[in-house]
Image: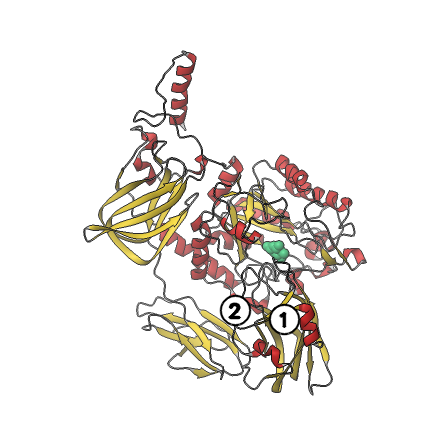
């Protein structure tokens, strides 16, 4: 900063002394003016947000107790009673992963407020927790303060409880709720707004569907301005900004490139995508030279759902999976927003806590040694000989000091001589984003057997680019080539790290006759497995050859090497094998062919004509059905998603009993396999699945799409 002031002082002296120069300051060896910023730029709040890199989401409300993803709004506050709630434990578990903040679902779509708001009675004071005297938002905010994490709030715009939803009165209430949250709990780093809006709900007993016009109803510019006025340091996040945008998927993998600049098409989520792109693709990649600095946030959950469900204890993301997400989010310049849902006790479950801690340990080990430290650096071009543009600035770990080139030099290279031979597999690059996103294409080379060998090429750097090599790289020299840019280069960081070795997670497959095989590559590891859902240890069954498991179960397997290192556990919940199953309507056979890749896809109307009673399956013998599963067709962007269903069983194929009717909440944003547990297990030979309603796809088609239907016993 001092240096910049120095330069400004020189320019000032020239101005006040009336000194006139005919030689432009730019593009000469004596060029001392700082490079002009390029394109859209981050504001102060965004810079502080970028520096956080990764933080947590905490989804916790009545849904945790009803086992749902979306509450209807008629939940009795009496059910909200965590037995051992401990915000310190939750925040500490989050911190152990290296996350730097927490965004709490202060109110989800069901409308239940986790703080004693004056705006509605449907809040925590009506619950038995702490005899109605508790304030969970405060407990989280305080725990964050104690642990040194930042605090953020998610307040769902859609409120399925509020009687005024759909009128201006509700918008006023919503704003008042924000006012309370932003004035009573200290500094907030982010306000989070989702795009799920309007539909059926309780609405204080009306039990009806209320549609709103997303683009006008909330009048977002007014609300966002109010939020910024109350918390100038906070970034405002929604599908389309204004400060941070949704990455367009809940899978936890951002696009590559993922530009921080973005031109939303239309406002407030009501966007018309650019020609040839869906809205989601726009969020995934951003817009090169976009009008605004609206970087992406990659949000995903450590579990399949956003809320805790015991049935998903087997599907908690492993430390290595979290590493993959880290590279695919932070590693392309977005932030990583990892959801950690507390269980019914009000604690981060031991399984999730274990994963988080190990993930944090992997990152710590990776970042413990920077093999670029102490290197000598030279560049093909330097803006001038002043220290502020020196190539060595890429080594000082400061994201805003940089190696700078002359104004007309948008492609150049920089070389690190490590002085000794080092082994690493991660290369980190950063740009000084205060001056915009300037670099387009880059390549990284290493010196190998007397010549340069390219490790990777790519597009876009921005806040952070992590290049992850599958092979270990052993070399004494590294070269970064910027091959295309929109303005002179301002590269702030080149760092070299070694990611801890990983053993491949065993893959678990079952063939159509029910034989399970487990494989890992290379095939030299010892594989141990369990079929009862417990964690496989070295003492568990030794996998030698395929084994029969026609009735299904939870198979878990780990690879071990002879040095005692273990892989993450591979896990698969298998339904019963579908051999011998028949379907009433042969045209729908693909939904029971045990092939995830084949599917039924047809307009809902045509489907209802073809199968007016739904899909009827004869399993050939009695099965004790605990749950059924629906795997949506694998299309991107998603198509054919069923959101409402009915499920029946029958002992004789003639008389039917309805077992379940409901919605696949949040399937649009997260189209993974849906599992629905029956209230109690039911023994039956036949089942019937009825798609009642579907979600219109991005191309407005209203198809029923089904890859597989299954049964878990
Ligand atoms: C979505 C919601 O519908 C989900 O339930 C979840 O809260 C996710 C983070 O945002 O819009």
Q: Tell me if 436 is positioned left or right of 709 in this view.
A: left
Q: Whole-percent x and y of residue 37?
A: 44, 32
Q: Is mark 2 within 8 Å of ligand 1?
A: no
Residue pointed to by mark 1: 676
How many numbered marks are there? 2
Where residue 312 sits: x, y (%)?
Answer: 56, 67
Question: What residue sits 38% from the left and 45% below the top?
Answer: 441
Residue in front for this viewpoint, 583 or 427: 583
Task: Farthest residue to the left: give it.
Answer: 450
| Few, some or many residues within 10 Å of mark 1 (<14, 14–19, 20+) | many
Secondary structure under tag 1 reads strand
Residue 644 position within the rendered picture, expressed as x and y whole percent measured from the top left: 68, 67
Split into quadrants, the picture shows ligand 1 in the one at bottom right
Return the residue nearer the eye: 706 or 9: 706
Identify the residue at horizontal 49%, vertical 47% (top origin): 100
The front one of 207 and 234 is: 207
74 relative to 415, above or below: below
Q: Quadrant of the N terminus?
A: top left
- The image quadrant of residue 131 is bottom right
Q: Which residue is mark 2?
A: 314
Q: Count neighbours of disc 2 (C-alpha within 10 A) and say few if under 14, some if 14 to 19, many if 20 or more.
A: many
């Amino acid at each position: 900063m001092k240096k910049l002031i120095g330069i400004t002082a020189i320019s000032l002296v020239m101005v006040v002394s009336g000194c006139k120069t005919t030689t432009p300051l730019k593009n000469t060896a004596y060029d001392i003016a700082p490079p002009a910023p390029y394109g859209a730029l981050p504001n102060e709040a965004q810079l502080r947000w970028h520096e956080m890199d990764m933080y947590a989401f905490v989804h916790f409300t009545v849904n945790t107790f009803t086992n749902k993803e979306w509450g209807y709004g008629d939940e009795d506050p009496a059910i909200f009673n965590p037995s051992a709630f401990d915000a310190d434990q939750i925040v500490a578990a989050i911190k152990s992963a290296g996350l730097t903040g927490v965004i709490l679902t202060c109110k989800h779509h069901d409308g239940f407020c986790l703080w004693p708001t004056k705006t509605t009675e449907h809040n925590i004071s009506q619950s038995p927790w702490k005899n109605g005297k508790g304030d969970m938002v405060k407990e989280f905010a305080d725990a964050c303060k104690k642990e040194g994490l930042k605090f953020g709030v998610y307040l769902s715009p859609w409120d399925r409880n509020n009687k005024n939803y759909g009128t201006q009165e509700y918008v006023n209430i919503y704003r008042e709720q924000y006012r309370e949250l932003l004035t009573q709990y200290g500094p907030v780093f982010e306000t989070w707004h989702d795009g799920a809006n309007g539909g059926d709900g309780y609405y204080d007993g009306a039990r009806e569907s209320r549609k709103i016009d997303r683009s006008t109803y909330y009048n977002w510019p007014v609300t966002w301005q109010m939020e910024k006025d109350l918390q100038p340091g906070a970034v405002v996040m929604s599908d389309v900004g204004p400060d941070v945008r949704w990455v367009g998927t809940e899978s936890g993998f951002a696009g590559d490139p993922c530009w921080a600049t973005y031109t939303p098409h239309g406002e407030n989520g009501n966007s018309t995508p650019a020609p040839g792109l869906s809205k989601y693709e726009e969020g995934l990649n951003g817009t090169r030279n976009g009008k605004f600095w609206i970087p992406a946030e990659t949000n995903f959950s450590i579990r399949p759902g956003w809320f805790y469900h015991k049935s998903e204890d087997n599907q908690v993301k492993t430390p290595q999976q979290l590493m993959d997400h880290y590279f695919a989010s932070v590693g392309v310049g977005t932030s990583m927003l990892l959801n950690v849902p507390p269980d019914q006790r009000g604690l981060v479950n031991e399984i999730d806590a274990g994963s988080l801690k190990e993930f944090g340990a992997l990152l710590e080990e990776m970042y413990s040694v920077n093999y670029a430290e102490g290197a000598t650096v030279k560049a093909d071009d330097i803006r001038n000989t002043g220290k502020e543009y020196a190539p060595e600035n890429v080594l000082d770990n400061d994201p805003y000091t940089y190696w700078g080139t002359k104004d007309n030099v948008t492609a150049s290279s920089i070389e690190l001589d490590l002085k000794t031979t080092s082994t690493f597999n991660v290369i980190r690059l950063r740009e000084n984003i205060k001056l915009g996103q300037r670099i387009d294409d880059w390549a990284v080379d290493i010196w190998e057997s007397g010549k340069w060998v390219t490790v990777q090429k790519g597009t876009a750097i921005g806040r952070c680019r992590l290049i992850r090599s599958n092979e270990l790289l052993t070399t004494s020299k590294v070269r970064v080539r910027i091959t295309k840019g929109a303005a002179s280069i301002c590269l702030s960081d080149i760092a070299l790290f070694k990611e801890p070795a990983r053993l491949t997670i065993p893959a678990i497959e079952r063939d159509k006759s029910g034989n399970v095989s487990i494989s890992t590559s290379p095939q030299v590891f010892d594989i141990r497995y369990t079929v009862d859902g417990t964690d496989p240890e070295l003492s568990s069954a030794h996998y030698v050859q395929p084994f029969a498991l026609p009735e299904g179960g939870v198979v878990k397997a780990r690879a071990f090497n002879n040095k005692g290192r273990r892989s993450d556990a591979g896990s698969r919940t298998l339904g019963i094998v579908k051999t011998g199953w028949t379907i009433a309507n042969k045209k729908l056979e693909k939904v029971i062919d045990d092939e995830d890749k084949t599917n039924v896809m047809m307009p809902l109307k045509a489907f209802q004509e073809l199968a007016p009673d739904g899909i009827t399956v004869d399993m050939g013998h009695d099965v004790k059905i605990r749950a059924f599963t629906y795997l949506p067709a694998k299309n991107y962007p998603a198509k054919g998603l069923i959101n409402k269903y009915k499920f029946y069983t029958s002992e004789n194929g003639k008389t039917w009993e309805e077992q379940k009717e409901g919605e696949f909440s949040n399937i649009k944003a997260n189209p993974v396999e849906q599992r629905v547990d029956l209230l109690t297990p039911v023994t039956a030979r036949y089942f019937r699945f009825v798609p009642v309603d579907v979600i219109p796809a991005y191309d407005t088609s209203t198809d029923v799409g089904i890859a597989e239907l299954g049964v878990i016993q």
